[in-house]
Image: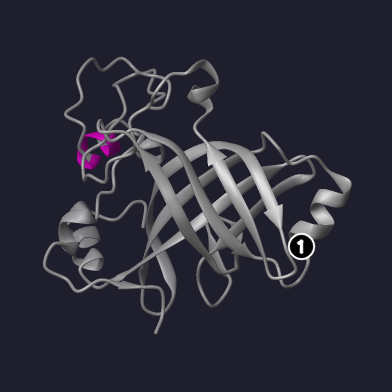
Amino acid sequence: MRGLPVEIQEEIAKQYSYLIDGIEFDFPNGSKYFLNFDMDLIYNGIKWEARSFKYDNAIMTIKSEVDYVTFKIDNRDGFFTNLTKDYDVRKSLVTIYRFALQDPAKIVAHTMIFRGLLDNITITEEEASIRIANPFILWKIKTPRRIHQATCMWEFKGTECAYTGAETECDQTFERCKQLGNECNFGGFRFLPSLQDKEIRWGRK
């Protein structure tokens, strides 16, 4: 979709209605990408493998801060069993993303919703129960959760923004980010407004 006028992108966005989550694991032997869907998908050159998972809980404070997220993920093929026999996966970086899909199954946008370190894993023949801890809890620091919004969350020219050009202002919109040639680091979910009046289906029926 890069290179298309914003007006055309907005029209395309009106056609999607699937929201699904994906998990990226940065294991000692390499990265793995799992999608809570019924088929594998390719996105930005990366193969996201179909593997079911469900969240147990997200422990939150009254200030909407997340300490950790726990989930159960399918292990019927023995993937996690074999992995933990050869590697210590504790403290592996884990990132949870939310994807917007068009029909047929095509990812058109994504946003990161949580990132942390693998704190604990319990494995059975059926599933692996995994807890991801906010890395800041190691220093007893709370970090606000990622909020779904159409505008960018990153501080202009900050670490996540990564813009190093000569411009000195940004209104946090995707249009401005694109003008600056920095849309690859846009920290918002730009298609979110198009979902306001839609019936959202999670995964496939």
Q: Quadrant of the N terminus?
A: bottom left
Identify residue for label 1.
79
Q: Is residue 139 left or right of residue 168?
A: right
Q: Nearer the viewer, residue 83 or 17?
A: 83
Q: Nearer the viewer, residue 170 or 144?
A: 144
Of all residues, the one furthest to the right in this rendering is 86
Residue 174 lies in quadrant:
top left
Q: Position of residue 42 (x, y in %)?
A: 56, 64
Residue type indicated by callout 1: Phe
Q: Quadrant of the C terminus?
A: bottom left
Residue 179 lies in quadrant:
top left
> What residue span does the magenta drawing correspond to?
174-178
- Circle 1: is it few (<14), some (14-19), or many (20+) Cα within 10 Å? few
- Residue at position x 16%, y 29% from top? 171
Number of dots carrying numbers: 1
Q: Position of residue 184 (x, y in %)?
A: 41, 40
Magenta stretch, main secondary structure, is: helix
Q: Position of residue 125 (x, y in %)?
A: 75, 69
Q: Nearer the viewer, residue 169 or 101?
A: 101
